[in-house]
Image (spheres, helix red, strand yellow):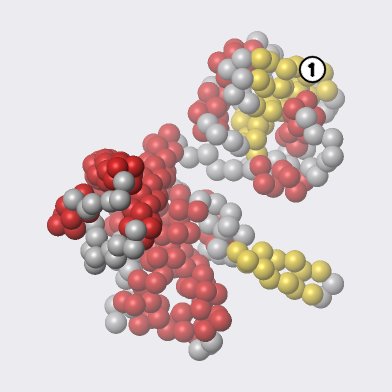
């Protein structure tokens, strides 16, 4: 079987082919989009295996290549950098490295979810983008008010206060124009967020895993759906602690010669999950005596360990969530 390494870009891709003995027999740069690349690969003598690096659209490309190749592996880009720290880097070299890794069966792979799961994840991220845009708009409005020494009333975003805001008088027409445009942007985002959340809730309400995780104190539908969507298949995690590495909530480590240095969390994986699980941890601390006791044990009554304790609690919740999804058991502790 031949082994093919692909260095893939939107408008240009490079292929490197090794024979069954690991000897390079062909290296070629193909200009054009992915359909041209796939058409060229169809001409290659079968059977063959393909390896390429994960990037934007890797799920689609994986599915298309799986139709023509006996085996397709998607390499983890972060772990590839650890393997190949070379000062000589270009598309042809990268394609050959991927082919060699494939031949040696040493590819650090990433999990490729189905198109339904990818669209679910993408919609969750789209909602986060809309929320961030709304937050930026709110901050810009508050900054405009502060510029003119106008105190923001409580519950500024209520209907009555928004009406008050739209009737405010500013020193110049340009300031008023800014206010009007910011308000238009704010109002335009509301229906978009509602449509997105309605679509997400339709999926979440029908998913048993989401409903299961919502039995945990402090875990709402947004947290549960994000965790379930990114875990997808709980059985792919052979160890419970692997979930912390997957979501990047474990500390970076530099251990050598008896010294063990721990740094900030690795922040691998989706940032959206880290955000919502941290929020859920705070809610869990408030609502559950069990979660609060875990947090306080890590904090050790030291203010400087507050963030450490929060991250540890979030990590604990992720381990609990994985175990619940694997066993189907509900939360065992009642809220305080």
The answer to whether residue 39 is above or below residue 63 is above
The answer to whether residue 84 is above or below residue 143 is above
Q: Which residue is rendered at x = 67% and y = 68% of the image?
A: 263
Q: Which residue is rendered at x = 50% and y = 28% of the image?
A: 60
* Residue in front for this viewpoint, 290 or 251: 251
Q: Which residue is rendered at x = 21% and y = 49% of the image?
A: 166
Residue 270: x, y in percent? 51, 51
Residue 27: x, y in percent? 78, 19
Image position of 169 (left or right of 329): left
Residue placed under numbered mark 1 in the picture: 26
- Image-quadrant location for residue 105: top right
User: Furthest residue to the front?
Assistant: 171
Image position of 99 (left or right of 59): right
Task: Residue 208: tell me if it is visible.
Answer: yes
Quarter of the picture containing the C terminus is bottom left
Quarter of the picture containing the N terminus is top right
Q: Which residue is rendered at x = 55% and y = 30% of the image?
A: 62
Residue 186: x, y in percent? 29, 46
The answer to whether residue 146 is above or below residue 127 is below
- Image-quadrant location for residue 96: top right
Task: Residue 117: tell me if it is visible.
Answer: no
User: Furthest residue to the bottom?
Assistant: 301
Residue 122: x, y in percent? 42, 40
């Amino acid at each position: 079987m031949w082994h093919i390494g692909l260095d893939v870009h939107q408008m240009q891709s490079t292929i490197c082919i090794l024979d069954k003995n690991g000897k390079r027999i062909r290296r070629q740069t193909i200009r054009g989009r992915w359909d041209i690349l796939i058409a060229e690969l169809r001409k290659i003598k079968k059977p063959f295996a393909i390896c390429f690096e994960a990037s934007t659209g890797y799920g689609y490309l994986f599915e298309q290549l799986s139709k023509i190749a006996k085996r397709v592996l998607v390499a983890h880009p972060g772990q590839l950098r650890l393997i190949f720290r070379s000062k000589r880097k270009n598309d042809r070299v990268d394609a050959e490295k991927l082919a060699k890794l494939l031949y040696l069966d040493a590819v650090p792979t990433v999990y490729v979810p189905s198109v339904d799961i990818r669209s679910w994840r993408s919609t969750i991220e789209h909602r986060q983008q809309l929320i961030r845009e709304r937050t930026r708009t709110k901050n810009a409005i508050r900054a405009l008010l502060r510029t003119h020494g106008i105190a923001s009333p409580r519950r500024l975003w209520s209907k009555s206060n928004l009406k008050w805001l739209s009737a405010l008088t500013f020193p110049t027409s340009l300031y008023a124009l800014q206010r009007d445009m910011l308000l238009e942007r704010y109002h335009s985002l509301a229906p978009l967020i509602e449509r997105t959340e309605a679509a997400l809730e339709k999926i979440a309400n029908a998913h048993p895993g989401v409903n299961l995780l919502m039995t945990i104190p402090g875990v709402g539908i947004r947290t549960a759906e994000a965790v379930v969507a990114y875990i997808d298949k709980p059985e792919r995690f052979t160890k419970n602690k692997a979930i912390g590495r997957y979501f990047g909530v474990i500390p970076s480590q530099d251990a050598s010669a008896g010294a063990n240095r721990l740094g900030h969390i690795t922040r691998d994986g989706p940032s959206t999950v880290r955000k919502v699980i941290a929020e859920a941890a705070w809610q869990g601390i408030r609502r559950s005596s069990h979660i609060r006791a875990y947090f306080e044990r890590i904090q050790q009554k030291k203010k400087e360990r507050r963030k450490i304790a929060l991250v540890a609690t979030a990590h604990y919740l992720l381990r609990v969530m994985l175990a619940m999804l694997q066993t189907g058991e509900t939360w065992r502790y009642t809220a305080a």
